[in-house]
Amino acid sequence: MLKIQNLTKTYTEGKVAVDNLTLQVEPGDIYGFIGHNGAGKTTTIKSIVGIHEFDRGEIYVNGISVGENPISCKQVMAYIPDNPELYDYLTGIQYLNFIADIYRISQKERQERIQKEADDFEITHALGDLISSYSHGMKQKLALIGALIHKPKLLVLDEPFVGLDPKASLLLKEKMRELCSEGSAVFFSTHVLDVAEKLCNKLAIISQGKLQLAGETSYVIKEKSLEQVFMEVAVHDTTD
Amino acid sequence: MIRQIKLLTKLQICNLFGINEVRFTKDKKKKARFCGLSVIWAILLVCLLSYVAGMSFVLVKLEAAQLIPMVLSGITCVIVFVFTFLKTGKVIFQQKAFEQQIVLPVSKTAIIVSRFLTMYLTNLLFTVMVMGTGGVVYAYLVQPNISFYIYGVVCTMLLPLLPITVATMIGVIITAISCRMKYKSLVETALTMLFMGGVIGASMFSSNTGQIAMEDILQSLARMLEQQIGGMYPPALWVGNAMVSGNLTDFLLFIITSLGVFGVFLFCLQKCFLSICTALSTNAGNKSFRLTELSTSSILKALWKKEIKRYFASPIYVTNTMMGYFLMVVFPAIFLIADLGNINIINGAKSLEQTLQMEAVIRKMFPFLLAIMPSIMPTTSVSISMEGKQWWILQSLPVSKEKIIQAKVLADLTVVAPFYVVSEILAIITFRPSFLEMVWLLVIPAVYILFSAVAGIVINLHFPVFDWENETVVVKQSAATFFVMLVGAVTCGIPMGILVVLPEGFEMIYMAVVILLVLGGTGVLWKSKCVDR
């Protein structure tokens, strides 16, 4: 579903944010991407979703090259950043309808999906309000509904659990599992190691732009906890 | 309190014009861009100061040197007032900065004064340059006594205070009225436009040019200037009298008025500041929302609808861009209402236009005069930057760059269309043009509107700003705004200038060539940046 080959991204100031990164996400995977602040997680994610251009390497989504055919890739993908800034001047329903228009979802389908997801996330009552009146958590929920509205084959999330209340966190995990059970894949970055350990079937640890460890969760963790592994791999690497 | 004000003002000024960012960024492109822009600003500044100096020389030659301080202070105050008025609400009631500052142990007064001071200091810079240049010319040619210098320095320092206070006062009243309403942005925009329209209208009808009778045109213009500025803005007259005649009463009157109005305003604003800020951050909720039938749109229409909503959600965006469109209608309206042919300015029956043989020139130039107004600030000039931190949405959605640009250009054309239609109707009624004149009158503004919409987006794509906290930074202070204004003025101004000096009989070919060139330029710009490759 997602194939990253030798991805390298250098910023104009000369800082290498991602260095020769290679990993693969299969359909059905819930893939956790872990690293300390500034490790290169967000840069990798932004390269996948077409926000950042990259210097070297290739990214394929559903077998299509992001560099060559970004629109086709985005058609099957959805992305939510760590701090989803949405259109404050639209109401919740206007935003969702706008997203549905862009993905060309039929009127019947969008009606059903918006109703269901908004009910699940318990924000139906607020859909008529301007987004500027929403709390951080409500914006996050709205962004999630917008991301799920076209049933993406690949859902890419940057720190999705920040700002969500426990109930919404639980719901998001359920939605992830539901999506993956239908053959899609989820790729997300997180600092919450406990969640990653329990939720993901695959993990990757990145440090200073380089992939340190990747594979099945059991392979990555072995006999230890993810926290121990992370401290050994990532923190050890930054002190070198 | 003084320490708090100093600290807060320093914080605001530290990134004025993006100086702090340029100072510490490691991005060489950003630094180079800033340097290039600074050079252009410096050139423009030299042009402005040369213009001020030239104007002062002309007044001396007209034996009206005594008008220099009054005229310059009047013009400065009008400019300061207009520019402050259009951004005051956003500066005084900056939402994010308010939330960050109000939790600190600083007083409300310190927050208000620091915001006010930032506006004052930037305007003072402009005032010192204008008044200083005119003052140097006056001092060199007239050699006044010491009171000119003493009063001059004090008056210059206080000059921006009154227009900023009055503009802020009106801005605050508008914000206070609109902040509690459901559609606060729309109400704020409407009130701002209404006020600006009122000011323009009032100045049109108070101009009274028809009744002035004098023996010499230039002298009459100087006298007219004195009457106009003195009538519209008496403090300018006080400044003039204080500086030129050493009139202590007028000097004190100016100081007391400036400081008094500011003091009263500050006292009143303190009382309502917090409640306005709170009301601005509170939105009317609709707790009983029920999902009804949703409409579907094509991608382009969805993007266009989003653009239109974004545009009308920002009063500062609307008022700044719509001013040009608004003037596009006002301009032919002035000619229609004033009936230029019957205005007697010179003693006797001769009209101004007959005396200066202006009618033919005005008729010829009118298509360009109409075109220049919407060209200097199209909505597209900042429409990419206005995406701000929400730019990620469009970047990550499956829409092509071409579609996004098409929607933005289309939104600009949608906004300008009603103004274009009304201004054309008024122009046709006023000038009763021949068939060919009608063609130029209709086509030239239309092609320039299209050109400026495309040029605006291309320039904004070259100079985007996304990491802003306050819309004022994008709409009023960004490089894109500046370049679009420059391009609009130059591309309209040069052909208009050539037209004036063009020999008789070449107009038709000339106009056709201009239209083709502008359309060609539009096409080249579109292909260069707006088409997916």
Image: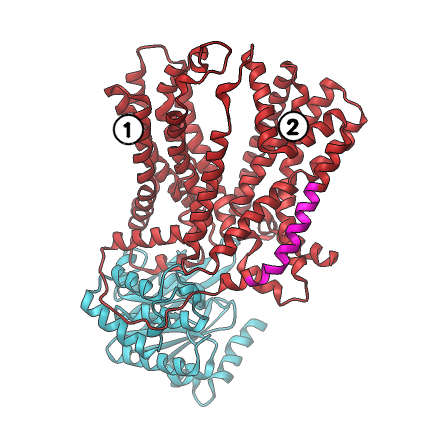
Question: Closer to the N terminus: mark 1 or mark 2?
Answer: 2
Is B172 displayed left or right of B516 in the figure? Answer: right
Query: Where does the image place residue B187, in percent across and percent down from the top left?
Result: 43, 53
What SS does tag 2 mark? Answer: helix
Magenta stretch prevailing secondary structure: helix
Q: Which residue is mark 2?
A: B70
Is B344 displayed left or right of B93 in the figure? Answer: left
Query: Where does the image place residue A157, in percent across and percent down from the top left?
Result: 38, 70
Q: Chain of mark 1?
A: B
Is B76 displayed left or right of B386 in the figure? Answer: right
Question: In front: A129, or B344?
Answer: B344
Q: Quadrant of residue B341?
A: top left
Q: Which residue is mark 1?
A: B442
The reply to whether residue B330 is visible in this rendering is yes
Q: Quadrant of residue B452?
A: top left
Q: Residue furthest right?
A: B146
Please provide the residue range marked out in magenta: B257-275
What SS does tag 1 mark? Answer: helix
Closer to us: mark 1 or mark 2?
Answer: 2
Question: Residue at the spot x=31%, y=28% of the render?
Answer: B444
Give the distance between the C-alpha atoms of the residues marked 1 and 2, in whole angstroms: 41 Å
Are the residues under badges 1 and 2 in a single subunit?
Answer: yes
Which chain comes out cyan in the rendered image? Answer: A
The amino acid pointed to by label 2 is: Met
